[in-house]
Amino acid sequence: MILPMKKVSIVLLNKEREQALVNLRKLGLVHLERLEGNSEKLSAFKEYSSNLIVAESVLGEIKLPKKQKKNCAELSYQKAIELSSEIVKKSDKKKQLLEEISANVSELERFYAWGSVSLEDLSFLSEKGINIKLFEVPVEKYAQIDEALDTILVNNDKKTARFILLNAQKERPENLLPEAFEVPLPRCSTTELELQIKENESSIEQIDNFFLENVCFINSIRKAKKILEADIEFENVNAGMNRENLGNENDLAWISGYVPTENLQELKDACKEYCWALSFVDPEDDDIEVPTKLKNNKFVSLIYPLTDFLGTVPGYHEYDISGWFLFFFTIFFGMIFGDGGYGLLVTIVALIMMLKAKMKGGKISPLLGLVTLVGFATVVWGAVTCTWFGFTPEQLPQWVKNLSIPVISNVYADAIWQLPWTKEGVGLTTAQNMQIFCFALALFQLSVAHIKGIKSNLGSLKVLGEVGALMQLWGLFYVVLMMVVNGEVFALNAIMINGTIPIGIIFVALVLVGFILSFVFSNYEGSVGQSVLESCKNIISVLLGVVNVFSDIVSYIRLWAVGLAGAAISSTVNEMAGPLLGHAILFIAAIALLVFGHGLNMILNLLSVIVHGVRLNTLEFSSHLGMSWSGFKYNPFRESGK
């Protein structure tokens, strides 16, 4: 459930502001509204934090051999700040040196074919009245240079001739070939460039040695970063608090936030103890900053590791579907992972890890509980469908096949299941039965969504809109069976009530009546006419809504299709490894192939669960609930680690 919140405002003396925030942080109850502080102290903290992050990144890139690893005495908070500042300076200096080396290397490469170039020598010649310029020209063009020009060929290769133009003037000679390209002189002599590169490389080596000497302090830097994060949070609140500016010691300051209703009395007692003024009200429907705090039993809380990983938090005014999420995700996981053998491996590994944690006296992680649950669900699904490590039913013992449910079991993959209303020889295949099961899951889950909507809108005519949506869902379920599964078995007149009323027509009528109810009442806010007008304004979206319901139901077929793909991969792996097992020399290769193939398949199945199993909960199910997952977690202002 989503715990109810109270919006609170705390008023105190401005001169006691910092101590009040210390006490408020110790209390750890108030989720503060967003504040943007601005102070010199906060700016300094942010600069320190930036330095610590860069320092951690720089030192984290250094990988020392185990023999070279050493333990350093832990640095104090202030020393860690100072070290991080020095690391940042040296890191920036290293970047500058690397850029200079790159520029100098490029310059040397430009004059590699010319040999050594000395600006001092060129300057000396210029003082003696001999001006020199460097040119390059296609090798076949050099012989065409005007003889009136004084040139000296330096060297040439297959493509380019390099020559010196003597007595060169500032302006380019008019009789010089247009193909001749003047080579700009280097910024300094090539010998000096080489010397600068060596000096820069030596400086970089010194910087790297400094990093190596201090890499053992990385944990101290990480601890300082955590401390600083708390300091930044505190100073941001301190600088961002609202306050009076009357210029006397009794100026007031105040801050607002949210507290769970169950903790309100504790906050009242604290305000009384510290002489703070307190006001509190219920959040309004249009309050968008109300945090969400979920509270469920230990079993339902198993879903929290997954939702925390996904970052999905329901809005304060939305639904807590943690229980339903866990229920359906468990089923979806079992169907997509599919193989009972895989599920058995997952369950055994999870149980071993839980046992180890218990023996060490530690707390069992909810994640292990979730893994155990979905592993067991996979075992159950593998048992009822007779899917074990990709083996064919013929390769499995009879007692294993007896565990399966015939209508969806691989043992009876080629069977035709005749229904009471079908003529002899006409029925459903095992694959079609599986499709029906997927669509039935869709009907169940999406019906839950609309039933919750009906419950939340009781007392308003808007409830008729939800009833209409539910009727459309049930009617379109039959349409899906008719159009996707088997048009003959589920024809409109295939099933008759009392021999006269076709049940298919009843389901189609549900769609039409449901559409009318939804069209008239889905936007109801006190006026039927206004609701109809809103539907008319969005007539295209309303019509597409019917199509969306159809596609939402059909999308659940992915549970069967993805599971089928995983089963095909595991079967293929077995077929590839089977011939190798009969040869002693190739036996190890066969085992390696089986481990790799099935391991890869399990990883792919896990990714499929995240993509498809989660999607059905967070998209299809949530869209029918009207949920946008727009919430954010209750995160009170409190001391680190509390």
Image (cartoon, rainbow, N blue to C red):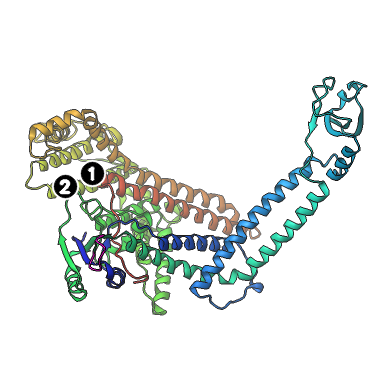
Count of numbered marks: 2
Pick the front one: 131 or 103: 131
Is residue 466 found inside the magenta-colored segment of the image? no
Q: Position of residue 520 (x, y in %)?
A: 12, 33
Q: How far apart are marks 1 and 2 (CA)?
A: 9 Å
Q: What element carries label 2?
A: helix
Question: In which quadrant will I find the N terminus?
Answer: bottom left
Q: Which quadrant of the view contains residue 97?
A: bottom right
- 442 horizontally vs 594: left or right: left
Residue 402 visible to the viewer: no
Residue 168 visible to the viewer: yes
Q: Mark 2 points at which residue?
A: 453
The disc at residue 442 is none
Pick the front one: 108 or 628: 108
- 49 horizontally vs 126: left or right: left
Q: Which quadrant of the view contains residue 170?
A: top right
Q: Position of residue 381 (x, y in %)?
A: 34, 55
The disc at residue 624 is 1
Which segment did they paint magenta? 245-251
Question: In which quadrant will I find the C terminus?
Answer: bottom left
Instruction: Label the magenta part by its dominant secondary structure.
Output: loop
